Amino acid sequence: MTTQFIVNTAQRAIKDGLLASALSGGLMAARGKADTGSAVAPLNAPSQWVHGREAVHREDVTASHTLVGAAIHTASAMLWAGLYETLQARRERRTVTGALVDAAGVAALAAVVDLKLTPERFTPGFQHRLKTESLWMVYGSFALGLALGGLQRRHEAPRVSDLD
């Protein structure tokens, strides 16, 4: 039962992370266009992990910046979705309210870690290309993606109490 619990939780985290990444990435592009005139600049920014600070200023679509930035953003979303699914698994019943509370908490923690606790090179970088209100929207859409993903098939989702 323990192995199946872990596999099921990991699968759900991957799906939740993909949805959260898609929603927040789409909003990031829209807000990047509105804030700086470049939809792709905020998507390129996470590639600073690989390419350094110059990646934050790239405004063209390239495999080495756009695809790498999107991959880093998606992998990070899946990691945070793992925490979200772990919180959800601790609930006896998965409810809309619980999903929203857990998703908001994880998104808030992600924002603090990303923007305040992480060394500059390993921040998402998009915070340099978006206005503050746009950042709020991006992290809000990330939370919404986690919640929507987590609510899919919620009655079949694993719970920690199933391990007993």
Image: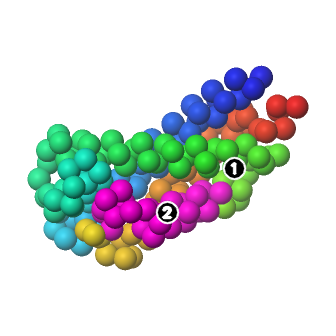
Q: Please give the residue where the numbered disc 2 appears in the rendered image.
A: 113
Circle nearer the viewer, 1 or 2: 2
CA–CA distance in space, label 1 to label 2? 18 Å
* Residue density around tag 1, few if under 14, some if 14–19, many if 20 or more, within 10 Å: some
Give the residue displayed 31% in from the left and 59% down from the top.
121
Q: Quadrant of the C terminus?
A: top right
Give, as a three-letter code, the residue at label 1: Leu
Give, as a three-letter code, the residue at label 2: Val
* Residue density around tag 2, few if under 14, some if 14–19, many if 20 or more, within 10 Å: few
Q: Position of residue 61 (x, y in %)?
A: 14, 48
What stretch of residues is rendered in magenta?
102-127
Q: Quadrant of the N terminus?
A: top right
Q: Please give the residue where the numbered disc 1 appears in the rendered image.
A: 87
In the displayed structure image, the side of residue 78 where residue 69 appears, left or right:
left
Q: Which element type, helix, strand or loop, lies under badge 1? A: helix
In which quarter of the view is residue 158 placed?
top right
* Residue nearer the viewer, 104 or 124: 124
